[in-house]
Image (cartoon, rainbow, N blue to C red):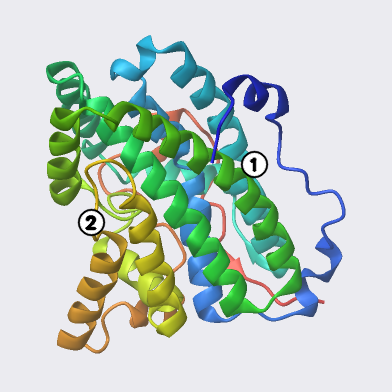
Amino acid sequence: MSFSIERYKEESKKLDTTGVAWADVTAHSLSKGDLFCLHYMMDIENHVPLYLSHLLVTRACMDPILTAFLACWNYEELWHGENLGKLLNLYGIQFDTQDRIARVRANLGVQNSISILTTMAGSWLSKDFSAVYLSIGAINELSTLTGYAALIRKSNHPVLADLLSRIIKDERRHFAFYYNSAKEWLAGNEKAQRFDRWMLDRVWVPVGKGVKRQEEVDALALYLFDDEQGEEDLLALDEKIGRLPGLSGIKLMSRALYEARARARQNPDWAWRLIETESWAIARPKHSPVAELTGRRGGDPSYQLVEAD
């Protein structure tokens, strides 16, 4: 699994949706679980610029290869979120995309600023912090494309399958970069290996945690992976990440699934109630009005499911 940054820069582009049968979106139904996952995935794809802001205050900003990759990666991820939102709109779920993104960010409050400061401090205190965010990048990209593949299997919606298959191709390239960069950093560096494993065991969280509440993260995990095939996919994911130097036998995604199952056993309504009640909308921030943070004007856009023709 090789990666050429020069080739990637030349080939990086907006997601190609030529030939996607957008007109057929409403010809096939999506379950409440499918819709929950799509909203979650859209929000996290649209959150990438804030994640990028965390990386650029670390030592990553000094590495021209890393910054070249991140510039292209950020642009490609933008179009993932845009097209997931487009599919939802065409299905009949109406919302103002920019207002939704602003609300997601505003609801983070001071959490985002604190996270940036701690990430920056950790990076400059230890040069091996780079191994951690490269490993996390590999895990997150692999879990993202695994999640998209699971949603294709669950939804059985041909237009969604086509769109997600195209996005998966991008995510595979992103994974290849992070994985190979992490492998290069960790190879022969026992200190970095120990630090990387210690940090992953203690600070890694599933994609979206922090932006989404624990119950929302569990709802996604249980819907996509709480069956034999899903569990096998997560175990295979852990096994692949375990091939990185120093990470043999590590269990992250499978552990997240087992912990979600344990919480659901304690409370049978846990997570599934979010899917059943169609908890898609993003609440207006309590203490940080979007208009004050972004300068946007206008009323409160409606957010509702409308009947398709």
Which residue sits at x=26%, y=59%?
252
Q: Amino acid at mark 1?
A: Trp
Q: Quarter holding the C terminus?
A: bottom right
Name the residue tied to disc 2.
250
- Residue at image position (27%, 86%) is 269
Say above or below: 258 vs 11. Answer: below
Q: Earlier in the sequence, mark 2 or mark 1?
A: 1
- Helix, strand or loop under label 1: helix
Callout 2 crowding tier (Cα within 10 Å): few <14, some 14–19, many ≥20: some
Residue 87 image point, x, y percent: 69, 60
Contact, mark 2 vs mark 1 (Cβ under 8 Å): no
Residue 305, how many percent across, how many down? 61, 72
In which quadrant is the N terminus drawn? top right
The numbered disc on residue 262 is: none
Q: Residue at x 51, y 40 (%)?
A: 176
Q: Nearest the camera: 98 or 199?
A: 199
Q: Vertically, is 281 above or below 11?
A: below
Asked where in the image residue 230 lies, by quadrant, the reply is bottom left
State which quadrant residue 234 falls in: bottom left
The residue under label 2 is which amino acid type? Ile
Percent of width and height locating residue 267: 19, 86
268 vs 85, left or right, is: left
Q: Along the line of sight, which residue is nearer the eye, 103 or 15?
A: 15
Res. 203 in view = yes
The answer to whether residue 92 is left or right of residue 259 is right
Q: Residues within 10 Å of mark 1 (few under 14, many from 20)?
A: some
Q: CA distance from mark 2 to mark 1?
A: 32 Å
What residue is pinned by disc 1?
79
Residue 289 in view (yes/no): no
